[in-house]
Image (cartoon, rainbow, N blue to C red):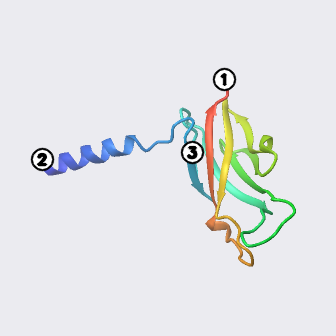
Amino acid sequence: MRPLLFAVLLIACGSSGTEPQLGENIEIRLGATIEIPDDTTRVQFTDVTSDSRCPTGAQCVWAGEAVALFTVGGSQQVSLTLGADASRATVIVRDKQFTIVALKPYPKLNETIAKGDYIATIRFTSAKN
């Protein structure tokens, strides 16, 4: 009985430290859902509508951009753009600043990225001054 109790306590203690915190980078795979830190609102990474980032191995005159869609609270659609204009990478949602930090994998010349391979790195911070 003691080993079972120890295992249950170990699992319970280990899981409490894995919740994302405000200000931390959070990786989320396309189709997955997370909760906004310090909130119960759920955010789902729903789509990558375009990815024109300059592929590794190519010479481009423009760095390009990637547009990722998220569904907040089951109904609010949020579009975040990773590119030269940093203001398009952030929105305010439920008193939190929601920012896309990165999108993996990065395109490679002559290779196609399957939608299911996308992983967005996002961050929530307080929008209150």
Q: Are marks 3 and 1 in contact (CB under 8 Å)?
A: no
Residue hosting label 2: 2
N-terminal label among 1 and 2: 2
Residue 71 lies, in percent from the top left, at 69, 48
Q: Amino acid at mark 3?
A: Asn
For the residue pair 103 and 38, the one nearer the viewer reads as 103
* Outermost residue, left side: 1
Question: What residue sits 62% from the left and 38% below the top?
Answer: 124
Sort mark 1 into few (<14), some (14-19) or many (20+) by Cα contacts within 10 Å: few
Q: Nearer the viewer, mark 3 or mark 2?
A: 3
* Outermost residue, right side: 61
Name which quarter of the figure residue 94 lies in.
Answer: top right
Residue 15 lies, in percent from the top left, at 37, 45
Residue hosting label 1: 128
N-terminal label among 3 and 1: 3
Q: Is residue 37 left or right of residue 114?
A: left
Question: What residue sits 82% from the left and 46% below the top?
Answer: 85
Name which quarter of the figure residue 66 lies in.
Answer: bottom right
